[in-house]
Image (cartoon, rainbow, N blue to C red):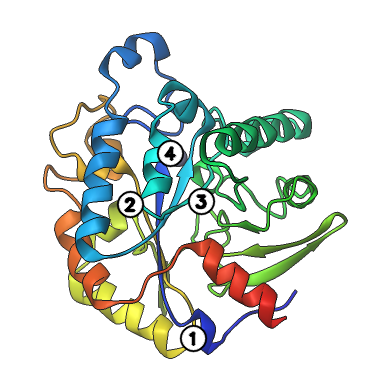
Amino acid sequence: MSVLRSRASACHAITVDVEDWYHVCGYLPAQERMRQHERVEQAVGLVLELLRTCGVRGTFFMLGSVAQQHPDLAPRIAAEGHELASHGWSHRLVTELTPEEFGVELAQTADLLERQTGYRPWGFRAPRWSLSRETTPWAFATLAAQGYRYDSSLTPLALIGDPQGHRSPHRIETPSGHLWELPPLVTPTPFGNLPTGGGWGFRFFPRSLLRWTLQGYQRHGLPGVLFLHPRELDPDGPRLHLGPLREFVAYGPRSSAADRLEPLLRRGTFRPLRELVESWQTAS
Ligand SMILES: [Zn+2]
């Protein structure tokens, strides 16, 4: 496994997991009832507007089921110069899928995105980071065999990932070829890594800590991979009743993440993950 640090990677990435307000992991909503309140197009519109205002292109990990339900959404995202990648089809955790089911979800999503946008996705992100060398070792070979070039599912955090895992992009060798792994940004501390790259941690920790972390990544030639859900920019959107703690983790306070994100996007250099991987492929 090779770890990558280079000047070419000294820019960051904003990534968006394209799902609706009710796609909260561990919660199985009555889909038909929820679909009466689809909000994803409106929420993605807010993300696109923010990125347009800041002059930034990002990577959008689409759920296949959302792309099917909203066939204009992926073309609309692609038309603004963003990258489309895969978030699987159903939003079930990879650990809940058989290898065969995982392969079918990957292929269905890639086929649909290719029909809708004209190109197959290079990247994959598992729902709730549910990919690991220990629990789903077969999944990396499946991704490589299907032509995926990179994964962004291994988070170096306790409880939901491997706290000893790499913070740097690195290559994973599989029997079907190699994959680049791009972990999400975290803040290293003597007590462990903090989840500052997205979700509740991005909304909770001081802004100065986010800036300091991104600057640290830049100094070391590492891309800081931020992640976002459209619902986090949609403070008026509906919410599942999950209890105070889980609601905060899923949605945050009624202020949106946009006011935190905008200054970071304006100050830094951001590129889609596909372009980072392309530059490493060319260099290696
Ligand atoms: Zn998700």
Gap between marks 2 and 3, in whole Å? 13 Å
Dots 1 and 2: beta carbons under 8 Å?
A: no
Q: Is residue 237 above or below residue 159?
A: above
Question: Which residue is painted at 42% across and 80% down in the image?
Answer: 190
**For ligand 1, which image quadrant applies?**
top left
Quadrant of the frame with the C terminus: bottom right
User: For the residues marked 3 and 4, what is the alpha-carbon distance in whole angstroms?
Assistant: 32 Å
> Which image quadrant is residue 243 in?
top left
Of the residues under marks 4 and 2, which one precedes in the sequence? 4
- The amino acid type of the residue labelled 4 equals Pro
Q: Nearer the viewer, mark 1 or mark 2?
A: 1
Quadrant of the rendering where the N terminus is positioned: bottom right
Badge 1 element: loop
Nearest to the eye among marks 4 and 2: give it. Answer: 4
| Residue 4 appearing in the image | yes
Q: Which mark is residue 160?
A: 3
Identified at 41% across, 90% down, the residue is 219
N-terminal of the pair, mark 1 or mark 2, is 2
State the mark number for residue 75: 4
Counting residues from the start of the chain, the first of labels 2 and 3 encountered is 3
Q: From the image, tell me which residue sits under label 1.
A: 221
* Residue nearest the observer in this picture, 26 or 280: 280
On residue 199, which mark appears?
2
Query: Residue 213, position in %: x, y?
Result: 34, 78
How far across and down, in percent of the image, does residue 28 sit?
Answer: 44, 21
Q: Is mark 4 within 8 Å of ligand 1?
A: no
Packing grade of label 4 (10 A; few <14, some 14-19, many >=20) is some
Looking at marks 3 and 1 on the same chain, the residue that comes earlier in the sequence is marked by: 3
- For badge 3, the amino acid type reads Ile
